[in-house]
């Protein structure tokens, strides 16, 4: 039996006197009572009810999936009154399933099951987790948070689309050609690739930039992706292709003290491959080193080791929401390093593999 349906069955068994659905509803379970209407108002009541069911189905499919149980009231003094049941003549099962399908986009197909607690008909509608972001045909987007359906708007909606639909802004067409790439950035890329054992790619980065970009998915039909410009672009290319390129870096003697600006976002920031080196140098120069003795050896403990800084800063750029305004913010103090990015966390990015490249154990490179 599907796990969500088992949850619904257990909840039906738990209904008792002084019933309150709030005590049982959860991330994957919601109860609905069918409207009790006179014959003259059936059509209008049905439409409002089916609209509510469509929004609830959207809510579940945009989260973990779940079950909508029809035929149970939110509150009731007795179990008998709580399980109101479904009038199958006015709300036939196939009509309910079709109503949700027709009022959602992409259409949601719920899996219906009939239950008969205490001899009354109840519908359990299993809502699958969606592979894309779903809304109603009237443009309502919601998701399940705990036992409530909450609106999805702005950056939350874009973030869910990024994860569900595998949308990658950085893979989009920048409109620029390989002439927009910085020679110095390509040379730095070659150095990092060679340190990681990618000699063929390193040679292409040095000698045949077009071939390098094709082999790494950064060039399509003769035009660079946005990721290529972010990673290796010239200052002019970055200014033209990336509206808010850059980073703000501040340092404080303590977390609450006045900040000293080390780098402003308005400065002409280099491409990301070079910018990461610059950020590591800036913050690394502020790190304290504590020497401790371990047996006969002395060990240096650094506040913020270069490899850790590269990983943190790379993730700040690789996983930010590039369609959300704002810059990456870095605030340093001896006690903490706070790095924040605009928007919600975006998992997919064409920048990830290049940003996090670091020397293999046993090798070294400049910070």
Image (tube, rainbow, N blue to C red):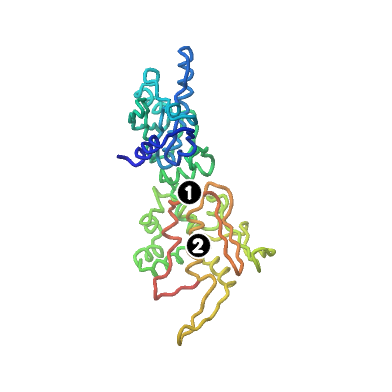
Kindly identify the residue that appears in the image at 40 percent across and 66 percent down. Answer: 193
Dot 2 falls on a residue whose secondary structure is helix
Q: Which residue is mark 2?
A: 312
Asked if residue 277 lies left or right of residue 79, the reply is: right
Kindly identify the residue that appears in the image at 46 percent across and 85 percent down. Answer: 297
Asked if residue 125 lies left or right of residue 257, the reply is: left
Furthest toward the bottom, the residue is 296
Where is residue 364? Give x, y as percent.
44, 75
Q: Which residue is mark 1?
A: 174
Asked if residue 278 lies left or right of residue 224, the reply is: right
Location of residue 258 with respect to 110 vertically, above or below: below
- Picture disc at residue 82: none
Residue 63 picture quarter: top left
Where is residue 88? Give x, y as percent.
37, 20
Location of residue 19 with respect to 273 vertically, above or below: above
How many C-alpha atoms fall within 10 Å of the one at disc 1: few (<14), some, or many (≥20)?
A: many
Of discs 2 and 1, which sits in the foreground? 2
Dot 1 falls on a residue whose secondary structure is loop
Which is nearer the eye, 223 or 135? 135
Furthest toward the left, the residue is 1
Q: Earlier in the sequence, mark 2 or mark 1?
A: 1
Which is nearer the eye, 359 or 223? 359
Kindly identify the residue that appears in the image at 46 percent across and 34 percent down. Answer: 135
Location of residue 240 with respect to 297 vertically, above or below: above
Q: What is the C-alpha distance between the residues marked 2 and 1?
A: 26 Å
């Amino acid at each position: 039996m599907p796990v969500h349906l088992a949850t619904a069955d257990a909840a039906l068994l738990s209904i008792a006197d002084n019933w309150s659905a709030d005590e049982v509803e959860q991330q994957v379970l919601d109860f609905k009572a069918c409207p009790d209407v006179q014959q003259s108002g059936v059509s209008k009541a049905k439409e409002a009810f089916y609209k509510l069911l469509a929004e609830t189905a959207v809510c579940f499919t945009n989260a973990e999936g779940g079950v909508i149980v029809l035929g149970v009231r939110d509150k009731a003094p007795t179990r008998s009154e709580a399980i109101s049941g479904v009038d199958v003549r006015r709300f036939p099962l196939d009509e309910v399933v079709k109503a949700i399908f027709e009022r959602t986009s992409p259409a949601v197909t719920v899996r219906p099951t009939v239950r008969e607690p205490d001899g009354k008909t109840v519908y359990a509608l299993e809502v699958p987790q969606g592979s894309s972001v779903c809304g109603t045909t009237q443009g309502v987007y919601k998701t399940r948070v705990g036992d409530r359906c909450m609106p999805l708007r702005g950056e939350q909606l874009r973030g869910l689309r990024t994860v569900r639909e595998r949308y990658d802004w950085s893979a989009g067409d920048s409109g620029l050609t390989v002439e927009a790439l910085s020679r110095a950035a390509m040379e730095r890329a070659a150095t990092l690739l060679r340190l990681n054992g990618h000699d063929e790619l390193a040679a292409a980065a040095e000698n045949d930039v077009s071939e390098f970009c094709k082999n790494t998915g950064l060039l399509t039909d003769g035009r660079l992706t946005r990721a290529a410009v972010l990673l290796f672009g010239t200052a002019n290319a970055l200014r033209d292709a990336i509206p808010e390129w850059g980073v703000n870096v501040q340092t404080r003697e303590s977390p609450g003290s006045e900040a000293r600006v080390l780098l402003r976002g308005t400065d002409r920031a280099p491409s990301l491959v070079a910018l990461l080196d610059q950020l590591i140098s800036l913050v690394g120069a502020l790190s304290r080193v504590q020497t401790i003795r371990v047996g006969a050896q002395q060990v240096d403990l650094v506040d913020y080791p270069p490899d850790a800084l590269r990983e943190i800063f790379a993730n700040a750029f690789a996983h930010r929401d590039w369609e959300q305004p704002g810059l990456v913010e870095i605030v340093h103090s001896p006690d903490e390093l706070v790095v924040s990015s605009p928007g919600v966390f975006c998992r997919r990015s064409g920048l990830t593999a290049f940003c996090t490249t670091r020397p293999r154990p046993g090798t070294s490179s400049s910070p």
